[in-house]
């Protein structure tokens, strides 16, 4: 993506609203395809096996943010792909950087669900 106008056009088409704090850098642009993310081949293989063809709106914007190492809070409907939006980037980081550690009372990732 070349410029702000193009990024906003994609976000508008995907119905994605991005809010960034006043002292933060702009959010990375959304992706339009899983191949845009240069994922590890084993992850791509699993995505293809499950017949996912395009990222959902939450995945399109959340995955680049998560892969950039930034904090992320995403809200979307049940069944919209939120879990994959957070876990695919985590798996990518583990695979790429061999981040297999044994944690004692520490979280590598915490994903919460508000089911009330």
Image: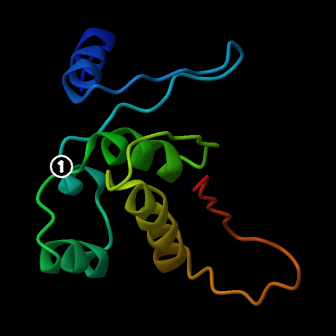
Secondary structure beneath dot 1 equals loop
Q: Quadrant of residue 41?
A: bottom left
Q: Residue furthest right?
A: 105
Give whichever of 76, 21 is nearer the camera.
Answer: 76
Q: Residue at x 48, y 52 (%)?
A: 67
Give whichever of 109, 25 is nearer the camera.
Answer: 109
Give whichever of 114, 97 is nearer the camera.
Answer: 114
Classify the position of the N terminus by image quarter.
Answer: top left
> Does residue 113 appear to the left or right of 7 in the view shown?
right
Instruction: Provide residue 79's location: percent of width, then percent of height.
Output: 32, 56
Instruction: Provide residue 24's location: percent of width, then percent of height.
Output: 66, 22
> Does residue 98 appear to the left or right of 62 in the view shown?
right
Q: Residue at x 59, y 58 (%)?
A: 113
> Does residue 82 appear to the left or right of 51 in the view shown?
right
Q: Looking at the picture, does residue 45 appear above or below residue 58?
A: below
Q: Looking at the picture, does residue 62 appear above or below residue 1?
A: below
Badge 1 is on which residue? 33
Instruction: Provide residue 50's location: percent of width, then percent of height.
Output: 17, 76
| Count of marks placed on residues | 1
Give whichever of 17, 28 is nearer the camera.
Answer: 17
- Image colouring: rainbow
Q: Residue furthest bottom?
A: 102
Q: Residue furthest front?
A: 116
Instruction: Provide residue 2's location: percent of width, then percent of height.
Output: 25, 20
Q: Residue at x 56, y 82 (%)?
A: 98
Classify 10 Å Cα crowding around label 1: few (below 14), some (14-19), many (20 and above).
few
Q: Residue at x 11, y 59 (%)?
A: 53
Q: Looking at the picture, does residue 72 appear above or below residue 87?
A: above
């Amino acid at each position: 993506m070349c410029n702000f106008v193009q990024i906003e056009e994609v976000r508008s088409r995907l119905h994605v609203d991005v809010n960034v704090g006043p002292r933060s850098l702009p959010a990375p642009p959304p992706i339009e395809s899983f191949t845009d993310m240069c994922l590890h081949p084993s992850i791509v293989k699993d995505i293809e096996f499950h017949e996912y063809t395009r990222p959902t709106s939450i995945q399109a914007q959340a995955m680049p943010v998560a892969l950039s190492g930034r904090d992320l809070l995403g809200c979307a409907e049940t069944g919209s792909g939120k879990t994959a939006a957070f876990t695919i980037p985590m798996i990518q980081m583990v695979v790429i950087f061999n981040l297999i550690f044994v944690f004692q009372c520490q979280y590598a990732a915490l994903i919460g669900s508000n089911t009330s």
